[in-house]
Each structure stands twice: as structure tokens, then as C-alpha cells.
Amino acid sequence: MASTVGKTITCKAAIAWGAGQELSYEDVEVAPPKAHEVRIQIKHTGVCHTDAYTLSGKDPEGAFPVILGHEGAGIVESVGEGVTNVKPGDHVIALYTPECKECKFCKSGKTNLCGKIRATQGRGVMPDGTSRFRARGQDILHFMGTSTFSQYTVVADISVVAVNPEAPMDRTCLLGCGITTGYGAATITANVEKGSTVAIFGAGCVGLSVIQGAVANGASKIIAVDVNPSKEEWSRKFGATDFVNPSTLPEGQSVVDKLIELTDGGCDYTFDCTGNVKVMRAALEACHKGWGQSIIIGVAAAGQEISTRPFMLVTGRVWRGSAFGGVKGRSQLPGLVEDYLNGKIKVDELITHRKKLAEINNAFEVMHQGDCVRAVVDMS
Ligand SMILES: NC(=O)C1=CN([C@@H]2O[C@H](COP(=O)(O)OP(=O)(O)OC[C@H]3O[C@@H](n4cnc5c(N)ncnc54)[C@H](OP(=O)(O)O)[C@@H]3O)[C@@H](O)[C@H]2O)C=CC1
Ligand SMILES: N[C@@H](CCC(=O)N[C@@H](CSC=O)C(=O)NCC(=O)O)C(=O)O
Ligand SMILES: [Zn+2]
Ligand SMILES: [Zn+2]
């Protein structure tokens, strides 16, 4: 086959031309990578609720036309000048949380957020301020620095990590967001201590992965909270010891009351995996006085705000947040792939649906049905 290196590649992508519209399966031209950029042939991608959130128009950073997708695995096709961390042929996972290892954030030792390209990433362009995608004669924006809903994508070199080529990409793509986010939130952001009591609000891909992390860290009581009764079986399969459905509690008993009752005064750790600001408040208020920590993972729509009585914080509860589970992608994601291969992290079990790229709108539809945990899209 003729080499594509240095040439524009025309391939298929799912383009979001406007908020609230279906994605359009069509040709896109993908320019070669410039200096410190990497062109990846995406093999598989997950569809995350954050893609749906941006497509809905509720994301203040959302801009169109754009190629969404941020949960992807693929093979490096070519690299631009100065790229040393990956090479053509490497099996990689795209990182929407990059890691430059040089900026104030990366060097702080306090966060996995990286400041190097956040501004351009948020505007949907590459670090030089331009796009590598064109369709219908116009530039198409990038998304979260990854745009995995294209058969080929271009990312910054700090937004990609090589992983064990033995790992199946139709599964490890999910380590690009949902699973890593939940597992890392429990094991890194909160670093749940052995014997802790933990409540997880929202037992989707993220919440179930928080449960996995709580199990790995030796939590003694793991309470899943979800309005969908079918999530009880899911939660218990991943290691939850208890399940609470807020909509079936006796009249007069709130979910906060129930969790306080189950944990002798409140949870050591709670996690919001719903994106609902009312749930975030309940998660905070279900924490134990004096030390309980509540970690916000869910993404809330533009204009939404959280609130509680300041007294809740004065009396020692802590409100925190977690992006990509606090995981530093280039340093730590290859290890999580190994943990998956060694059976320490469940990935396959979270895949409920498989779709072709041309069927991606159906993947978005099923995502809103209660029986979908994750849909994986085959990009071939
Ligand atoms: N911070 C980060 O880095 C990341 C954040 N996210 C965000 O995390 C959130 C969770 O993602 P994901 O797991 O994929 O989402 P899912 O929709 O699969 O899971 C959420 C679960 O919460 C349930 N739920 C909805 N409302 C309530 C409620 N009031 N009380 C309890 N449970 C409720 C849903 O039930 P039902 O199905 O019936 O609606 C569903 O089972 C999203 O907001 C997503 O955008 C995702 C990845 C990374
Ligand atoms: N653009 C949104 C915020 C969206 C958001 O919070 N993204 C998460 C990842 S969600 C993945 O599925 C994140 O990592 N945030 C950190 C960041 O720097 O974006 C908005 O403006 O509200
Ligand atoms: Zn995501
Ligand atoms: Zn950095």
C-alpha cells in the first residue's frame, strides 16, 4: 500500500455540524501532523456521556462543526518533527487530559491537569491555533484534543500514550475515559483507605468503575445509589455491598438519611457520577461530619451551580472534584492497561453494545437507554 506519510488522508468521520443535530457520517480530509503532533488511525472508540453533553449544546465550550469523541484507541500512522514519545506502529490511547511533564501543573505533584495546551484544546484547535480537519470545503474543529470519531485524527504529542500492543483496542479504548475516570477517582483522587465506607451516586460506566476502585483499595462498605433498579445487579457484580434506590425510600426518608443510617453517621467518601447538582448536594451531605469527602465527577450543564449550607463544610466535610480520575495519562495509563491485562481492572464487562462508525447515532440513542453501560464503536 502507498505510504500516507506527509499526505492528507481522506477517510470517514462522524461530524457534528450543529448542537442537537445527528452526527453526519461523511468524508473528512485529515492533514499530516505538524511538529510535535501525531496522526493516529483510530481503531475503536467509546461513546461517553460527555460527547452527548457537548452535542446537546449544554457545554459552554461546545463549538461546531466539530468531530467529537475522546475515548479512543488506535495505531500511530505518522508523527511530526520532534516527536519522541511515540512512533509509527505504536498502539496508543488518546489523552484528553494531556501530560507535558514541564508545566506548573505537571510539576506540582498535586494534580493531573496539564496547562500546556488547555486553552487551544478548549477552542477546538491544535496548539498552533489551526485545525487538521476539513470537510465540505471548511475547517472542522477538534474536540478535547482527541476527536476520536474520525478514522484518522491528529493530536498533540503530549495527548497520546503508547500502551502494550497485546491489549485489545476494542476494549482498552474505554480506558481513555470512563473506566479510568471512576477507578482513578477512588484510588488516586480520594485514595480511599482500607475499611472506609463509600457511596457512589450513579452506577453507569464511571460509577461502576469507582466501585472497582473502592474494592481495590479495601473499602468495607460500598453503597451504590441509583434511580434505575437494574443497576443493583450491575453494582453488586462490581463489588457493591449495598444498593439504595432513592425513588423507593419510605416517605419522609431522604437518601442522605438512609446513607447516614447505613454508615453510623455518614460516609467516609462519596462520589457523584450523575452530573446532577442536586445529587452532588446529597452526596456532600451524606458524608461523615469531621472528615467525609465528596468527590464530584459528573459534568453539569452550563449555568448549573452547586450549593449547600456552609455549615456542612465548617463541620469538616470536604468537597472535591476529579477529572480523568486524577490519572496522569502518559505516566500512569500504561500501568492501568497492564492491570486490565492482569485481571485487576474489569473492562470487557462494561461493554453492553457494539456499533459500526456509520451507526454512531444509534450508539448515542442506546446510551440514553437504561440497559447501556458503554457502547464501543468499530472505526474500520
Ligand atoms: N470528570 C470526568 O473526568 C468525567 C466525567 N464524566 C461524567 O460523569 C457522569 C457519569 O458518566 P457515565 O457513567 O458515563 O453516565 P451514565 O448515565 O451511564 O450513569 C449515570 C447513572 O446515574 C443514574 N442517575 C441519574 N439520575 C440519578 C439520581 N438522581 N440519583 C442516582 N442516580 C441517578 C443514571 O440512571 P438512568 O440511566 O436511569 O438515567 C445512570 O445509571 C457524566 O456526567 C459524565 O459526563 C465522564 C467521564 C469523565
Ligand atoms: N467543557 C465543560 C467541562 C467538561 C469537563 O468537565 N470535562 C472533564 C472531562 S469529562 C470527560 O468525559 C474534564 O476533564 N475537565 C477538565 C478540563 O480541563 O476540561 C465546561 O466548560 O463545562
Ligand atoms: Zn468521557
Ligand atoms: Zn503540563
Image (cartoon, grey):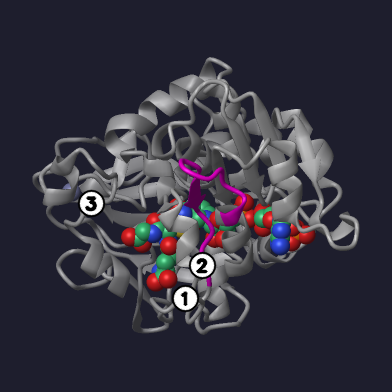
Q: Nearer the viewer, residue 9 or 316?
A: 316
Residue 354, percent across and down?
Answer: 70, 47
- What's drawn in magenta, residue-wise? 285-300
State whether the magenta stretch is mostly helix, strand or loop: loop
Nearer the observer: mark 1 or 2; the answer is 2
According to the picture, the residue beneath numbered tag 2 turns out to be 309
Answer yes or no: disc 3 within 8 Å of ligand 4.
yes
Q: CA distance from mark 2 to mark 3?
A: 32 Å
Earlier in the chain: of badge 3 and badge 1, it is 1
Measured as percent of width and height from the top left, residue 326 is found at 37, 42
Give the distance between the C-alpha atoms of the residues marked 1 and 2, in whole angstroms.
Answer: 27 Å
Q: Which mark's residue is nearer the viewer, 2 or 3?
A: 2
Residue beneath disc 3: 114
Amino acid at the residue labelled 1: Asp
Q: Quadrant of residue 348?
A: top right
- The yes-or-no answer for disc 1 within 8 Å of ligand 2 is yes
The 10 Å Cα crowd at callout 3, few under 14, some 14 to 19, many 20 or more, is: many
The mark that comes first in sequence, 2 or 3, is 3
Residue for badge 1: 59
Under tag 2, what secondary structure? loop
